Image (spheres, rainbow, N blue to C red):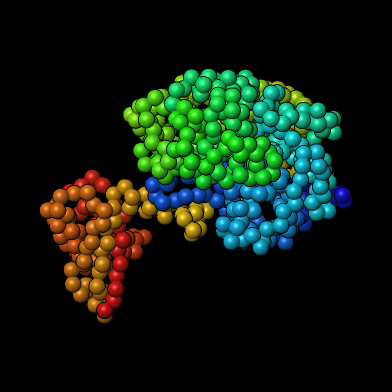
């Protein structure tokens, strides 16, 4: 590792000021190390938008510097955007766990970029060199999925530690607790910088152990006289394991329902993270060969997702299992903000069908995979970094984590609350760290809808919302050859309007007249800063407001004849 007086930079391109979309750059001289590359699930499904990706501009512009991408774990908000990045930028190697590697490979196959993917599997405790200037050690931490790492990155100016997503679970269901011994040793090296997970910085105390919910889950399942369905995140393989053990104790067979549930369990078994109990694990298609009190279904759809296995059960549309009175449904998950309505719909529908439904508000059937304040403090105490940047969270989470750090006195120099697009920089000559102005580096969001991806700016999102909420008005103007006169009255088409047929005809007529006048008077009125189309649209908007209190999307097109 060579050392010079060049600065060390840390540049978040996603994940600061939001939950999800994690993408971080560590840069020194002519080398970049990328940490994670995740997606965010938008609350704009109703607009037909499926995924949000971080803006890759900085990585595209600096492609020649990228030496590798390290993955902390296989959650979607850490790996989901990798196939999209590979479509734009060459990443020499992706360093990840075996489990995350399988998931990334699947994703790249689906998006047809597998030929651009080069992975190198790493295990906890391993240390690898990335480029000339970085050396990354993978430290085992507990979380709500398999093989989660914190990263200890040796740089020319000291140790940078990134916690990844973590909690200090002293009694994980399987596998060892987080490697605190290693954190204490790393702390003795006086780390330059700590970046740590802020997701749960609003919660005081210590998170509960994954094992702590076993008793309640077992009680609910053993007391049920009919079928039991447990909805959970498929990626939580520890909990799947725990539920398989409970099923065995209660004399039930396990049925997997939902594509991602089948996929995760298949990978976990193939990679020996789950025991291959073929005798008790069955495809959901076989469910009718068993008595209802022998059935435990592990299902996707804990967030009330449209067309998910659980939502189909709630709508009585699931092909394999019809919910009946006396059945038990457990949502072993938290409600992700924005999903409450969809989840409530599912819970209400299941109750209506006669099921007894248990969820986080009623029973202890879920624990978080992220550290609470006490664990965040413990990490700070073990590492005592010179500088600290809270990561993974909305601004309230980042600020509360920063408060914990400042009050603790564990950070010897400075705690920075950083936004995406800021550049944090350590300057060795002056021995200080500084933060750039916001948006020093391009950041933003790209959207994915089905198989297409692209960027939508704020005005395009606004147009999409207007069309969805209130419909669309097309005003087509045929213009005479000389360009200033209309050849005929504009043709108006209303789409998606909620009104009586007679009102619709009146609105169309009114808009046509208003637009015609606006067009003819454009040069006389000379509206400042407006194009002719904007001017005509403003009159259409006013005309429609005389009948309906709505703000539809208005599209004015002019064709010269
Ligand atoms: Zn995670």
Is residue 205 left or right of 459 when viewed as pictured? right
Which of the pair 43/258 is nearer the observer?
258
46 versus 233 height, above or below: below
Q: Pick whichever, 438 or 10, lies toward us.
A: 10
Q: Is residue 463 visible?
A: yes
Which residue is at 49% across, 58% downward? 451
Quadrant housing the C terminus: bottom left
Residue 558 to residue 128: above or below: below
User: Residue 45 appears at what percent x and percent y?
Assistant: 42, 46
Q: Give the image quarter of residue 514.
A: bottom left
Q: Residue placed at 52% from the left, 49% from the top?
A: 52
Query: Where does the image place residue 535, in percent across and percent down from the top left?
Result: 29, 60
Picture quadrant of residue 99: top right
> Does any portion of residue 417 appear in the rendered image?
no
Which residue ends up furthest to the left in the rendered image?
502
Residue drawn at (44%, 30%) of the image? 292
Location of residue 271 by image quarter: top right
């Amino acid at each position: 590792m060579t050392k010079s007086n060049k600065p060390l930079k840390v540049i978040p391109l996603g994940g600061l000021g939001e939950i999800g979309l994690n993408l971080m750059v560590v840069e020194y001289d002519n080398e970049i190390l990328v940490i994670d590359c995740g997606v965010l699930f938008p609350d704009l499904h109703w607009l037909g938008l499926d995924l949000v990706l971080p803006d890759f501009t900085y990585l595209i512009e600096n492609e020649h510097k990228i030496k590798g991408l390290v993955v902390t774990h296989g959650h979607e908000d850490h790996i989901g955007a990798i196939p999209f990045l590979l479509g734009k930028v060459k990443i020499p190697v992706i360093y990840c766990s075996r489990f995350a590697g399988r998931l990334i490979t699947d994703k790249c196959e689906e998006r047809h970029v597998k030929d651009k993917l080069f992975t190198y599997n790493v295990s906890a405790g391993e240390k690898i060199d990335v480029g000339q200037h970085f050396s990354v050690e993978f430290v085992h931490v507990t979380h709500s999925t398999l093989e989660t790492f914190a990263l200890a990155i040796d740089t020319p100016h000291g140790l940078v530690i990134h916690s990844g997503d973590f909690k200090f679970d002293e009694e994980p269901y399987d596998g060892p607790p987080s490697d605190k011994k290693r954190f204490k040793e790393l702390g003795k090296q006086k780390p330059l910088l700590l970046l740590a997970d802020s997701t749960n910085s609003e919660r005081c105390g210590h998170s509960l152990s994954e094992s702590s919910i076993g008793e309640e889950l077992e009680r609910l399942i053993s007391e049920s006289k009919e079928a039991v369905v447990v909805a959970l995140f498929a990626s939580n393989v520890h909990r799947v394991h725990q539920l398989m053990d409970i099923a065995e104790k209660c004399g039930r067979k396990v049925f997997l329902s939902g594509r991602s549930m089948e996929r995760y369990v298949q990978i976990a078994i193939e990679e020996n993270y789950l025991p291959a109990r073929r005798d008790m694990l069955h495809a959901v298609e076989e469910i009718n060969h068993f008595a209802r009190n022998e059935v435990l279904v592990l299902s996707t759809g804990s967030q009330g997702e449209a067309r998910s296995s659980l939502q189909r059960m709630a709508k009585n549309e699931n092909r394999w299992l019809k919910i009946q009175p006396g059945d038990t449904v457990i949502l072993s998950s938290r409600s992700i903000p924005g999903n409450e309505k969809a989840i409530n719909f599912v819970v209400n529908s299941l109750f209506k069908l006669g099921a007894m439904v248990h969820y986080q508000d009623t029973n202890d059937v879920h624990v978080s995979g992220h550290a609470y304040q006490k664990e965040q403090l413990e990490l700070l105490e073990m590492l005592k970094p010179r500088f600290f940047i809270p990561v993974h969270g909305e601004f309230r989470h980042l600020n509360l984590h920063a408060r914990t750090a400042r009050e603790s006195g564990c950070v010897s120099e400075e705690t920075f609350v950083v936004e995406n697009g800021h550049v944090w920089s350590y300057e060795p000559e002056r021995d200080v760290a500084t933060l750039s102005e916001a948006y020093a580096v391009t950041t933003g969001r790209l959207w994915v809808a089905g198989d297409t991806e692209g960027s939508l700016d704020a005005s395009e999102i606004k147009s999409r919302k207007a069309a969805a909420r209130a419909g669309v008005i097309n005003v087509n103007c045929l213009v005479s050859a000389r360009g200033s006169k209309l050849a005929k009255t504009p043709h108006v088409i209303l789409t998606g309007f909620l009104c009586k047929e007679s009102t619709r005809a009146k609105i169309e007529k009114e808009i046509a007249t208003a637009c015609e006048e606006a067009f003819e008077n454009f040069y006389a009125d000379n509206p400042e800063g407006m194009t002719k189309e904007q001017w005509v649209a403003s009159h259409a908007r006013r005309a429609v407001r005389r009948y309906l209190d709505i703000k539809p999307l208005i599209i004015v097109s002019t064709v010269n004849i």
